[in-house]
Amino acid sequence: MNLSEVLSIDYDDVELNKIDFNKFDSVNNAEPIVSLLKSYSLDIVQIYNAKFEYKINLKPFYLQRAKNFIANYEEKYKDKLFHDYCSMVVVCKRHFISNS
């Protein structure tokens, strides 16, 4: 079964047309696929149970999102740790450093 049949939607659905079926495994398709599934309150298991014919692997997409999140917030995290460290009393600082 193809995706439009599984979801019971028209082939010309706007969200469905955002997916590049020629490169279905591409990480670039992950966001449109997630958006489409959310729109129909479905998950991948339900799609497979409905006999969808392709595997959907969202791991590379979420791995990239996690890496981007870490890269974007790493400096803020370090700043927060440093701020917390600076506001500690000397005894706590020794404990903080020895546990690092």
Image: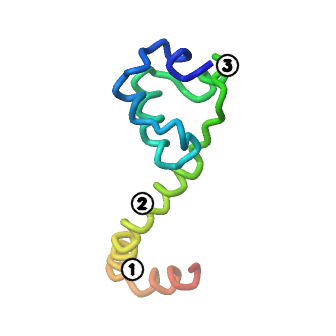
Mark with earlier residue (1, 3): 3
The residue depicted at 50 percent of the width and 57 percent of the height is: 64
Which amino acid type corresponds to the residue marked 2 in the rendered image? Answer: Phe
- 7 or 74: nearer the viewer: 7
* Residue 72 - label: none
Which amino acid type corresponds to the residue marked 3 in the rendered image? Answer: Lys
The residue depicted at 55 percent of the width and 27 percent of the height is: 43
- 83 or 73: nearer the viewer: 73
**Image quadrant in which you'd find residue 84:** bottom left
Helix, strand or loop for disc 3 = loop
Q: Nearer the viewer, mark 1 or mark 2?
A: 2
Report, in whole angstroms, how far the alpha carbon at label 1 lies from the one at label 2. Answer: 23 Å
Question: What is the quadrant of the N terminus in the image?
Answer: top right
Which amino acid type corresponds to the residue marked 1 in the rendered image? Answer: Tyr
Mark 3 lies on residue: 51
Please give left or right for residue 2 compared with residue 90 in the image. Answer: right
Mark with earlier residue (3, 2): 3
Helix, strand or loop for disc 2 = helix
Q: State whether residue 25 is above or below residue 88.
A: above
Q: State whether residue 22 is above or below residue 82.
A: above
Helix, strand or loop for disc 1 = helix
* Residue 69 - label: 2
Question: What is the quadrant of the C terminus in the image?
Answer: bottom right
Mark with earlier residue (1, 2): 2
The residue depicted at 65 percent of the width and 35 percent of the height is: 55
Find residue 49 and report its horizontal and vertical position in percent.
Answer: 67, 19
Report, in whole angstroms, how far the alpha carbon at label 1 lies from the one at label 3. Answer: 55 Å
Mark 1 lies on residue: 85
